[in-house]
Amino acid sequence: MRLPFPTLPLIQAPMAGVQDERLALAVGAAGAIGSLPAAMLAPAALERALHALRDAGRPYNVNFFAHAAPPPAAAADPRWLAALAPYYAELGLPPPQPDTAAASRQPFGAEAAELLETIRPPIVSFHFGLPEPALLARVHRWGAFVLASATTLDEALWLQARGADAVIAQGLEAGGHRGHFLDRDPARQLDTATLVSALVARLDVPVVAAGGIADAAGVRAALERGAAAVQCGTVFLLCDEAGTSALHRARLRQPSEPTALTNLFSGGLARGLVNRVMRELGPVSDAAPPFPLASAALAPLRERAEALGRDDFTPLWSGTRRDGCLEAPAAEVVRALAAGLEV
């Protein structure tokens, strides 16, 4: 079962913090589906990006988070501040203070829905479940095709029952935040190949494979397994059009560097390259505030360390495979992934 768009069966994964519409436009021009991560964009920036994507005249995807926002006060967990205090002292910063400011990652809401209704993007995708039914109905009303991420079969069935038009099977190999929303235990989640097979066998909607796919052979294997399309993110991180920082790029060039699932950078489990804070605190901490609040207390440490040329406190998102990363225009990555495929 294919997606209803006249493109290659390839989707560039939305990657908040390391890309804007330039990458999505370049991927779209190369014949695949580019994606815009919207969860961290201010309304004015989102509107500008959406106009640029619409005016290009090609299918594109706009991605939002659908998490339940925790109370801001949860960012002030004293255990978390105590764990970070030695690093503040080391870098000559004042002791960490409770920060109850609004989180930088916002769930999809009425303001975003109103903006999208004026532009009507053809594809809208969600991470961490789906928005409330009334908001989802607004998205469907203008004819948008809705994608949503699942990390288990139960999540996929939940998404299908509640209106997702296709489900992204996010395997454990995927970089960045896990899209889980029913079961947060990674021990119960599956590798991409196994998850895709399980979803194809049970779902009536198309399945998109995501995680650990870095070359044409991986794309073909996923399609042969029954996936309607493949979503790739890590392979685009070194592209000319990506906004990946110099520190992040330097680590991505080392394909043997290990990755791990961690909650230190946002409070939500996400896969990234192992760095100092992950080694010293352990990649997963019970003291970390819930997603997306953990980033507030880490921000001063990250800023000071990056100014010194260090990635000690920087989230270095990456999937398990970086051998497909090319320091080249995004079109070259699309061509490499699509070798042997037809629109």
Image: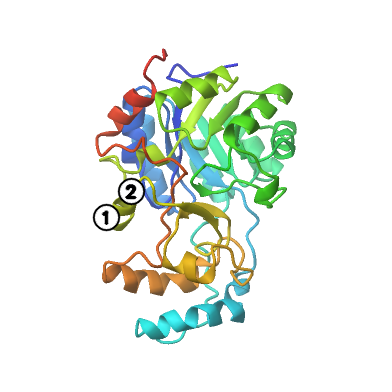
Left or right for 96, reference 80:
left
**Residue at left offset 62%, top offset 64%:** 290
Query: What is the count of numbered marks?
Result: 2
Height in image: 151 above or below 91? above
Quarter holding the C terminus is top left
* Colouring scheme, one of rainbow, by chain, secondary structure, one colour: rainbow
**Residue at left offset 29%, top offset 36%:** 326
Q: Amino acid at mark 1?
A: Ala
Q: Which residue is mark 1?
A: 246
In this view, the residue farthest toward the front is: 256
Asked whether residue 176 appears in the rendered view, the answer is yes
What label does residue 90 carry, if any? none
Q: Which residue is mark 2?
A: 254
Quarter holding the N terminus is top right
**Residue at left offset 61%, top offset 48%:** 66
Q: Amino acid at mark 2?
A: Gln
Left or right for 34, reference 167:
left
Asked whether residue 204 appears in the rendered view, the answer is no
- 3D distance between C-alphas at marks 2 and 1: 13 Å
Quadrant in the rendering for residue 90: bottom left
Residue 147 is situated, as x and y percent measured from the top left of the image, at: 58, 33
Q: Secondary structure at mark 1?
A: helix
Residue 269 or residue 107, whichever sits in front? 269
Residue 307 is situated, as x and y percent measured from the top left of the image, at: 27, 70
Residue 222 is situated, as x and y percent measured from the top left of the image, at: 54, 24
Residue 257 is situated, as x and y percent measured from the top left of the image, at: 40, 51
